[in-house]
C-alpha cells in the first residue's frame, strides 16, 4: 500500500475519478479498434441490403428522402452555428446522424396522421411538413416562429400539419400519444399516431403504462424508440438491464421489430408494416430503431464520455452517405443531381435564416397570452 497521503478528500476523489475515467476510455478505445473491421463489413452488407430495397422504390421517392435528410442535416448545422453566435438561446438538441429515422418513418404515413416527439424535434418537424422559416424563427425566439417565439427549440408545434410537439419532459409525450390514438379510435377516424422517443424514456413508468393501455385497448399507435445508445452522457449498457428494447413489447403481447436506423429505407419499410397493422387492425407496435447521434446530447455537451474512434465508426454508416452511395451504384444519382439537391437545400436554409433574423421579437404583452384556455379578463 502506498504511504502517500492525499492532501484532502476532494483531491482523493478527483484522482479516483480520473483513474476510472482513463481506464474506461482506454477500454473503450480498445473495443473500438477490435470492432472497426466488423462494423465496416456490416456497413457493406447493409449497403447491399439497401440496394435491394432501392430496386423496389420509385426514384422520385428516393430523391425526396435524400433531399429531406440533407435538409435536416444542413438545418441542424446552421442551427449549431447560430447557437454558437448567441443568436439562439436556451437548450438546443441537434438531430445530426439520426435523420433517417424521422424521414423514413414519417414518409410512411399520410398528411392527416399524427406525429409527436421529444425535445430533439427539429428533424421531425421538417419531415412532417413544417417550414424551415417558422422553425428557425422559433429557435431565434421570434414572433414569426411556429410557437410565436415562446416555445423555443424543444417546443415546436403545428396543428395544421398534425405535428403535436416537441415535449421537454423525458417520456412525457408517450402517454399523450396514447391519448391521441384513443381519441382517433373513439371518433372512428382512420388515423395513425407516430410517437418518437429516446431509449432513456423507456425506463420511465409512463412508457410501460402506455404500452399496456395501447395493447389492452387496441390503439392505432406506433411507438418508435430512437435508440441512439446514450441517455445524455450515460450509455445504454449502464442504465438498462434489458438492452434489447424491442423485446420489452413481449410483456404486453405487442408486436415489435428491431430496425437499422441508419438505413432510411429499412425504417420506412418497418414503419409501413406497423402503420398497416395500426390502420387495418387497430393494433399498436413498438419499433426499436438503432441509430447514433454525432453531436453531444445538447449544444452544451462536449461529449467526453465517448471516443472519437467510436463516433467515426458510426459515421462510416452515415445515413445520407449510405443512401446516396447506393443510389449512385444503381445509376439513380449523379454529381449534378446531388449538386442540385445541395443548392436547393442551401437556398431554403438561407431563406429560413433571413426570415428568423428579420422577424420581430414577441411583444411584451405576449407574456400573458396562451397561458389559459380561457384567458383571464381584467
Image (tube, rainbow, N blue to C red):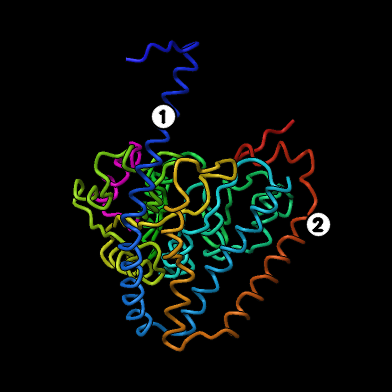
User: How many marks do you count on the picture?
Assistant: 2
Question: Where residue 369 sits: x, y (%)?
Answer: 69, 40
Q: Is residue 181 left or right of residue 147?
A: left
SS at circle 2: helix
In depth, the one of 176 and 188 nearer the eye is 176
Sequence-wise first label, 1 or 2: 1
Mark 2 is surrounded, within 10 Å at the Cα level, by few (under 14), some (14 to 19) or many (20 or more) other residues, namely: few
Q: Quadrant of residue 172?
A: top left
Q: Which residue corresponds to the image point at 34% horizontal and 79% vertical from the top-left?
A: 53
Residue labelled with disc 1: 19
Judged from the image, the secondary structure of the residue bearing numbered disc 1 is helix
User: Is residue 63 or residue 292 the one in the foreground?
Assistant: 292
Residue located at (47% from left, 66% from top): 103
Above-or-below relation of 204 to 166: above
Circle 2 is placed at which residue position?
358
The reply to whether residue 165 is visible in this rendering is: no
* Residue 307 is covered by the magenta coloring: no
The quarter of the image holding the C terminus is top right
Dividing the picture into quadrants, the one containing residue 135 is: bottom right
Q: Quadrant of the N terminus?
A: top left
The stretch drawn in magenta includes residue 214: yes
C-alpha separation, residue under disc 1 versus residue under disc 2:
51 Å
Magenta region: which residues? 202-222
Rendered location of residue 47, percent (x, y)? 36, 74
Taking depth in this image into account, of 200 and 308 the one nearest to the observer is 308
Amino acid at each position: 500500500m502506498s504511504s502517500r497521503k492525499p492532501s484532502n478528500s476532494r483531491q482523493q476523489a478527483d484522482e479516483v475519478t480520473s483513474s476510472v475515467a482513463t481506464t474506461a476510455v482506454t477500454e473503450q478505445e480498445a473495443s473500438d479498434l477490435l470492432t472497426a473491421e466488423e462494423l465496416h463489413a456490416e456497413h457493406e452488407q447493409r449497403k447491399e441490403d439497401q440496394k435491394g430495397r432501392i430496386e423496389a422504390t420509385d426514384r422520385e421517392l428516393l430523391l425526396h428522402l435524400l433531399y429531406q435528410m440533407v435538409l435536416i442535416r444542413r438545418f441542424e448545422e446552421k442551427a449549431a452555428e447560430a447557437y454558437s453566435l448567441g443568436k439562439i438561446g436556451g437548450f438546443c438538441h441537434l438531430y445530426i446522424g439520426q435523420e433517417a429515422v424521422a424521414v423514413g418513418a414519417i414518409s410512411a404515413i399520410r398528411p392527416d396522421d399524427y406525429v409527436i416527439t421529444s425535445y430533439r424535434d427539429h428533424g421531425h418537424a421538417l419531415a412532417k411538413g413544417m417550414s424551415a422559416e417558422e422553425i428557425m424563427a422559433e429557435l431565434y425566439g421570434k414572433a414569426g416562429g411556429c410557437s410565436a417565439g415562446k416555445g423555443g427549440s424543444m417546443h415546436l408545434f403545428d396543428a395544421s400539419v398534425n405535428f403535436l410537439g416537441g415535449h421537454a419532459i423525458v417520456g412525457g409525450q408517450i402517454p399523450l400519444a396514447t391519448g391521441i390514438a384513443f381519441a382517433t379510435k373513439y371518433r372512428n377516424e382512420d388515423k395513425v399516431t407516430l410517437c418518437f422517443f429516446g431509449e432513456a424514456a423507456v425506463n420511465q413508468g409512463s412508457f410501460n403504462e402506455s404500452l399496456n393501455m395501447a395493447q389492452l385497448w387496441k390503439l392505432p399507435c406506433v411507438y418508435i424508440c430512437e435508440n441512439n445508445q446514450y441517455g445524455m452522457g450515460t450509455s445504454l449498457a449502464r442504465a438498462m438491464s434489458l438492452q434489447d428494447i424491442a423485446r420489452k413489447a413481449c410483456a404486453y403481447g405487442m408486436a415489435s421489430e428491431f430496425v437499422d436506423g441508419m438505413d432510411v429505407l429499412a425504417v420506412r419499410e418497418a414503419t409501413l408494416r406497423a402503420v398497416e397493422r395500426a390502420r387495418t387492425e387497430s393494433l399498436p407496435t413498438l419499433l426499436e430503431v438503432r441509430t447514433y447521434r454525432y453531436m453531444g446530447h445538447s449544444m452544451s455537451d462536449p461529449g467526453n464520455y465517448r471516443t472519437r474512434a467510436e463516433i467515426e465508426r458510426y459515421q462510416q454508416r452515415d445515413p445520407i452517405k449510405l443512401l446516396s452511395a447506393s443510389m449512385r451504384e444503381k445509376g439513380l444519382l449523379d454529381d449534378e443531381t446531388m449538386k442540385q439537391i445541395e443548392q436547393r437545400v442551401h437556398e431554403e436554409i438561407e431563406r429560413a435564416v433571413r426570415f428568423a433574423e428579420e422577424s420581430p421579437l414577441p411583444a411584451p404583452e405576449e407574456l400573458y397570452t396562451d397561458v389559459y384556455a380561457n384567458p383571464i379578463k381584467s
